[in-house]
Image (cartoon, rainbow, N blue to C red):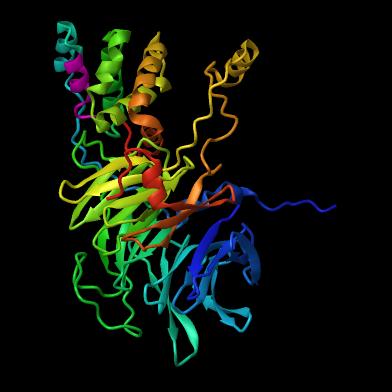
Amino acid sequence: TYSVISPYRDCSDIYSIALCPNNHDVHIYKKDGTKWTKIHELKEHNGQVTGIDWAPESNRIVTCGTDRNAYVWSLKGEVWKPTLVILRINRAARCVSWSPKENKFAVGSGSRLISICYFEQENDWWVCKHIKKPIRSTVLSLDWHPNNVLLAAGSCDFKCRVFSAYIKEVEEKPGPTVWGSKMPFGEVLFESGPSGVSGGAGEGAGGGWVHGVCFSHSGNRLAWTSHDSTVAIAEGGKTSTLSSETLPLLCVSFITENSLVAAGHDCYPVLFVYDGTKGSVTFGGKLDVPKQTSQRGISARERFQNLDRRATSSETTEQGLESLHKNSISQISVLEGGKSKCSTFCTTGMDGGMVTWDVKSLESALKGLKIV
Amino acid sequence: MSKNNDSNQFRKVDVDEYDENKFVDDEDNGESQVGPDEAEVDSLIRQGNLMEALQAVLKNPPINTKNQNDRAEALMLKVLSAFKSSDIEKAVQSLDKNGVDLLMKYIYKGFEKPSENSSATLLQWHEKALSAGGVGSIVRVLTARKTV
């Protein structure tokens, strides 16, 4: 199974991906026509690699792992050379993300904090600052705002927050955004409420671990998915939530300013549509519709077998899942078009598979699917 | 062979209790939800106005308060049992998303303490609630931090 993956497209339009096959290493594969060939093996971590991010402009890879370390890898000739980054954490690192300008990266960990790392020229060394308050449990997911300062973080303490990760050593003071204008390091500009549910029986949906977070391309909207099978979007002080009928979604990404693709334990990606004026999130459709296999007749013996095994004598003998992915999808990555006009994205799952999805083909293949 | 004569009492200490970083749940004791109006629901049942009774019993769910919860649960069971099997589907469809989620919570609460014939009724309601709310509604029962 692949635990993490990071796609990369270089100037000559050749695709590479860096992935971790659930061990201590990172493998880099290059696409040759339709074939993928392994070209590098990055061995340095002493524990499972939990996060990989490939910075396209500077061509550096950052990895983090359960060994509580992060490494920044640079290509020297034909070899990737690691530089250790001390994160000063005492639990496993869980996720890592380069900032848009690639001069910082953030690492979420089980130490209930986020390490913001930047390069100190004078000492020729990566240093880090911690964002601690008010995080009370493991940080599961991170996404940077396009202004290179704000960072969204999803945590096991059931909250999605927007922090300022402003580092005066590497950047100018940022201008105001819809999230606020005062952004000292560590400031919390947004925190999801105990019940993101708008109205309703007021039962105070307790929420669940926040698995995936994603800023829209403009940075004005923030979406997150929780373990209680909800999807929420915050914009301008207002949060809209949808209680989904699916199993919990583990990852989410904007593909236009109004559309989200999310996937998780149901093993297929789904579309959600956000209406800013109405403040509503609606289910847009399942994106993996398997071809209907013709229903053949079912023998009496099979009927009894089904009754015995699955308490139902129905005709569909689903020996396995009908979706492309055979296990939970853990990651969605936009490949082409960015988050404003995504044309291709890929999903990776715990089945070790990577599936590339073409938005145009989906729109034409699935009746009634409209990506707005 | 040497014998370990040292005290093993340390094994009985719950070290997590002394962890200063221990996660303490946000105690929201300010919940003034006292539960559905029993009198109102009872009269609606007697009048045969079951759809209204269902709406009424779903109002003001008592969150996290022990004795209120049991009363509300008993009341809910009364309403659910009063329905004819053929009317259950329509009743579920009259509920909004939050209503379906709340109904699911009550159904599972009812499963915890089965009484005479309660499980049969609850299973019928469960089937209809499941088709309305999907497995997501069950996930929300499992992950809810504030239970009815």
User: Taking A306 as reference, is A190 left or right?
Assistant: left
Majority secondary structure of the magenta segment?
helix
Residue extending farthest bottom: A122
* Percent x, y of residue B10: 59, 51
* Percent x, y of residue A86: 52, 76
User: Taking B42 as reference, is A140 left or right?
Assistant: right
Residue A151, placed above or below residue A58: above
Q: At 29% across and 28% down in the image, what residue appears? A: B100
Q: At 51% across and 76% down in the image, what residue appears? A: A60
Magenta segment includes A225 = no
Residue A167, placed above or below residue B57: below
Q: At 35% across and 40% down in the image, what residue appears? A: A285
Q: Quadrant of residue A178?
A: bottom left
Residue extending farthest right: B1
* Percent x, y of residue A243: 31, 39
| Magenta residue span | B51-62
Residue A116, placed above or below residue A3: below
Of residues A133 and A361, the one drawn nearer to the viewer in this rendering = A361
Q: At 44% across and 56% down in the image, what residue appears? A: A345
Of residues A187 and B25, the one drawn nearer to the viewer in this rendering = A187
Residue A274, placed above or below residue B116: below
